[in-house]
Amino acid sequence: MKKFRVINPDYEISYDKTIIDDLRFKNLDVVLSCFLCNPPKSKNEGLYYRIIKSKHGTCIQCIAFWHRQWFPYHIHDYHPFYIYLDDDKHVKFILIDDGHHYSKKIFIDKKKLGSSIRISFFLPDHGLTDRLNFGRVFKPNFIPLKPRQIINWWVINNMAQLKLRTKLVDPYKDGLIPENIPKQDSLIYRLNHISNFNLIARSENTLRYTFRDEVVCPVCNQLINSLDFIPVHKDQKSNHLYLKKEMKCKNGHQFIIKYNFQKAKIEYID
């Protein structure tokens, strides 16, 4: 375990189900539903969760996990959403994966008690949206997201790998939490993404905030966001695992990045 940093060392992890309470909070009930897809209900599928306590407040990290996504097909499908609470356990805001790993901040009125919000897993790619008021409501199977499970997912050496890394270690990391309502319609982006052609003419989503890691080209500072699968390597001297990949920015500059599991940090290799 010492070879992997799964949480900011200044934070504490809890699995207290009285806090998560079936997603029922003092000022808000979070209702989950599915539309044009099935909920995660097979063996070891469900809503993996952990509760992060820090000076910033409390964050409930949830990852909905399916063994398979049927369209476009691939094994292991992970979809995160985070619920942020204040010191009185009122929901302040929720982050959802609102379009191929882009994070959307849903503002919650802490003073409006007894309200509810529906978060839907929508379409066969299981993406999230807060803009559907129909679909099949389901009660998830809550599974503690233990360090060993995170590590097992991280070191899968193919596309089934968990690509949520530094922003799982730190749910307050820069580049994760938007300050404002997104300007572009990421739901349309998702529809275009899973189809073979653009259903609706719309430029590519350019939202800055994402659940995934980002790197900047060391030559021209071109931003490359939403890092995907990164191959696993082993240091022959220390036996520590790490991730390494050759990158190329839009301007044609090539460079190599490394994800250091011990530091939970993206590094550049000369």
Image (tube, rainbow, N blue to C red):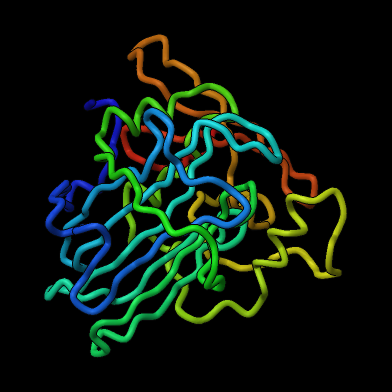
In the image, residue 136 sits, relative to residue 48, either above or below, namely below
Residue sitting at 58 percent across and 29 percent down?
A: 75
* Front position in the image: 233 or 194: 194
The one of 267 and 15 positioned closer to us in this rendering: 15
- Image location (x, y in percent) of residue 32: 41, 60
* Residue 76: x %, y % from top left: 52, 32
Pick the residue in front: 244 or 179. Answer: 179
Q: Which residue lies furthest to the front in this view?
A: 136
Q: Residue furthest bottom?
A: 111
Expressed as whole percent of the image width and height from the top left, the position of residue 210 reads 52, 59
- Tell whether 44 sits left or right of 208: left
Examine the rendering and report whether any part of residue 195 can be seen: yes
User: For the image shown, how many numbered marks are present on the structure?
Assistant: 0
- Residue 47 lies, with reference to residue 98, above or below; the image says above
Where is residue 71, by image quadrant? top right
Q: In this view, does 97 lie to the left or right of 123?
A: left
Q: Residue at coordinates 44% horizontally, 24% vertically from top-left? A: 155
| Percent x, y of residue 120 | 50, 61
Q: On the rendered structure, is 155 left or right of 219?
A: left
Q: Quadrant of the N terminus?
A: top left
In this view of the protein, which residue sits in the foreground, 182 or 18?
18
173 shown above or below 67: below
- Determine the residue located farthest toward the top in the rendered image: 236
Name which residue lies at 74% across and 50% down.
194
Q: Which residue is drawn at 43% across and 32% down?
A: 42
- Image quadrant holding the C terminus, namely top right
Residue 175 visible in the displayed image: no
